[in-house]
Amino acid sequence: MTDVTNGVLHTLFHSDQGGHEQVVICQDRASGLKAVIALHSTALGPALGGTRFYPYASEADAVADALNLSRGMSYKNALAGLDHGGGKAVIIGDPEKIKSEELLLAYGRFVASLGGRYVTACDVGTYVADMDVVARECRWTTGRSPENGGAGDSSVLTAFGVFQGMRASAQHLWGDPTLRGRKVGVAGVGKVGRHLVEHLLSDGAEVVITDVREESLRAITELHPEVTVAADTDALIRTEGLDVYAPCALGGALNDDTVPVLTAKVVCGAANNQLAHPGVEKDLADRSVLYAPDYVVNAGGVIQVADELHGFDFDRCKAKAAKIFDTTLEIFARAKADGIPPAAAADRLAEQRMAEARSR
């Protein structure tokens, strides 16, 4: 454990990935809860971010994930125009084996102990029903069911925001904010990807999809037989004539193996952490592939859960998510003016907003 602690302290105090305001280690032996809550920044307001429930290989991996994810939420919330900083929590363990009402209630008590500095929501391994349980112990809980004062599933607005980012990409590259006549490949057609496909078809795009779940593919092709299915993601990204690639499944989709073989001229999708490592954004730029930063275009979900704190209004949220179009265009313009990749331009804009908030 000493090595883990030393590693955490070094990251917090000495590395570029640090700078976090607070990291809380939580344990409730009676329920088996082991969790990490990381608050990266509260410069813009209470930290907001989901709770990930995952069987990490080690406690060190869990802490590292919490630190990285919370930092990403600071940037996402800043560019989404929210009065929230970035935070994230991870619960260590297999949710299929150890998730229980007792554990979720214990977790809720830990979040509540922060007095509103951290607002939680759903993430990988946690769902609306889980947030309903957490909310019984903690009023700073979003992502709840409509029956319990929440907004429910956020995938609708997440997909809408990604579509706005895609429209902005088309405007920047081709001079017209539409995907009509363009071939778009969507990798991952679960909740978000399914809604994105509907937007694309309504806009007149030709759509190619892939997913590891046969039932997800079938749900779309039965409704839209005009949609083409690729064998897998590797086949999808090599599709001839592909204009846009939308990674909507796991992170790390853009890496040393995939970037060299991309046929698309635009990458814009819902998946988090699409860039496998620093430098991939430059590789994309060198190949003249326009990258719409993931944390900018997939912010529709966090816009929705943030609105729960004010009494959820779908139309108000949709209007705010529509601004992702303008933000994406602003990032592309700044990237071109500064001679940097869009991912770097997005980071600069987010850091600028946080710095301005601290100076007030």
Image (cartoon, grey):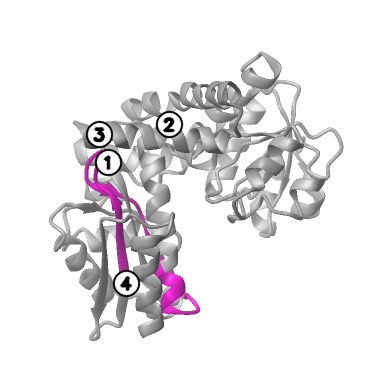
- Residues at marks 3 and 1 touching, judged by CB atoms closer than 8 Å: no
Q: Which residue is mark 3?
A: 357
Residue 206, disc: none
Residue 65 highlighted magenta (yes or no):
no
The quarter of the picture where the N terminus appears is bottom left
Q: Residue drawn at (79%, 53%), measured in percent from left and top? A: 234
- Residue kind at label 4, given as amino acid type: Ala
Q: Decide: few, some or many residues near mark 3? Use Cα within 10 Å; few <14, some 14-19, many ≥20.
A: some
Residue 35 sits above or below residue 233 on the image:
below
Front residue of this view, candidates 171 and 236: 171
Quarter where residue 309 is shown = top left
- Residue kind at label 2, given as amino acid type: Leu
Q: Which residues are magenta?
A: 36-63
Q: Which tag, 3 or 1, sits closer to the chain's start? A: 1
Q: Residue furthest front?
A: 14
Q: Which tag, 4 or 2, sits closer to the chain's start? A: 4
Quarter where residue 184 is shown = top right
Q: Which residue is mark 2?
A: 349
